[in-house]
Amino acid sequence: MPFSFLDPLFNMASLKGLILITLAIIQAVQCTTPTIGFISPDLVADIGGTVELVCTVKNGNEYPILWMKLEDERKNNPVPISTGNKLFFKNSRYSLEFDPNAGSYKLIINDVAKSDEGKYQCQVVTTPENVITADVDVKVKTTPVMKEDAEPVVMQEVGKTAEMECEADGYPDPKISWVRQDGKLLPSGQETLVSGKLTIPNVQRNNRGKYICTANNDVGTAKERILNLVVGFPPTIELPRPRVPQAAYYEAHLECHIRAYPSTTINWKRNETVLENDGNHFISHYADSDELVISTMKIYSVYEEDFGKYTCEAGNKYGKDTQHLELYESSIPICPPLCGDTDLNSAAAAKDMGKVVTFITGTAAFAVFQRLMMI
């Protein structure tokens, strides 16, 4: 075939025509394929308020267009809300506004409740296998709700690390703050601590008490919870009178003060033998506070074999303590219990001494008689 100088021009025209035809086809396809041109941004609503969700669809007249709720607090399955310009159910809180000229589908939710929170989706169904989607997330502001799963009493041994924790639900996420109920500073020296957890390293006895955690997110009323920190420690024994004098055949009191938490077992011993209540010994324990116990051993009539060393012993799960007392013989009866003054050198004791001496004869005679009855 002979070559013509017109062939290149013909080929250029053909290529240009092909390009124009292709562009026309693409434009035609684009004009008929639906797209979501606008979806409302994520939003936060107040309880009792109103939510408006807008979805604008281009070229969607020939296709099903739905509003779906993807997440529901009662179930995980998607819930259809509307199709086209119609709601799937009757609910006075829900309404739908449709603008066919703009292709706008506005879902309106009045009197918003916590259950309305979740993710909503605008769907354009082009084929059973193809769905065009756009999502909007709705959050609902709610007042704090304090979780109370953990016990309100936190116990820790002295010297170790104590931890107290508070959790609360709500939106926005509540902030947790701590103060002491008695108004004192926190163990860290601060008045207030903002944290979900209050940590006290090397906890001491003076850290014990009630702590208030408050959850607040500026929605509604803040919520409070009180946690009680109990600090356990081994017993320590204090002796008001390590050496106790008394005359024979008179009543004697031996006393020890035990500080401990939790409560302790207390024993009185004489020559490694545990003493018990009998006709001449009476042991009593009096709780002066939740960490102080006053233990007293009363000897109704002191005989020769009662003089000597005694042991007060106390123990709990954290440890034990032991202190020794001595009951020794005096030449005259000692107050108490004969009177309320314990200082024999005081003026009151000297004034009462005459009364004591006159009382000796009858009381001693009775003690001797009691001793003979026991033999």
Image (cartoon, rainbow, N blue to C red):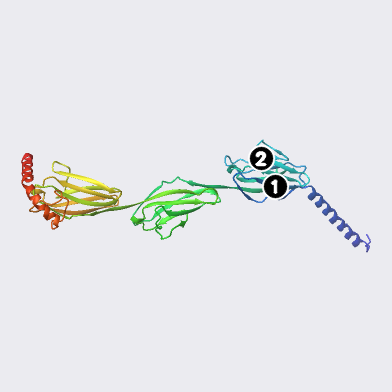
Q: Mark 2 packing: few (<14 Cα in 10 Å), some, or many (20+)? A: some
Residue 307, position as x, y percentages in the image: 11, 51
191 to 143, vertically: above or below:
below
Q: Nearer the viewer, residue 357 or 367?
A: 357
The type of residue carrying mark 2 is Tyr
Q: Quadrant of residue 107?
A: top right
Q: Residue at x 23, y 52 (%)?
A: 257
Name the side, left or right, on which 142 lies relative to 157. right
148 to 199, vertically: above or below:
above
Quadrant that contains the N terminus: bottom right
Tell me the number on the disc at residue 54.
Answer: 1
Q: Which mark lies nearer to you, 2 or 1? A: 2
The type of residue carrying mark 1 is Val
Residue 112, position as x, y percentages in the image: 61, 43
Q: Judging from the image, what secondary structure is the residue with disc 1 in?
A: strand
Which residue is under mark 2?
94
Calculate the distance from the C-alpha at mark 2 to the C-alpha at mark 1. Answer: 14 Å
Name the side, left or right, on which 226 lies relative to 126. left
Q: Residue at x 33, y 55 (%)?
A: 205
Residue 159, position as x, y percentages in the image: 34, 57
Q: Quadrant of residue 10?
A: bottom right
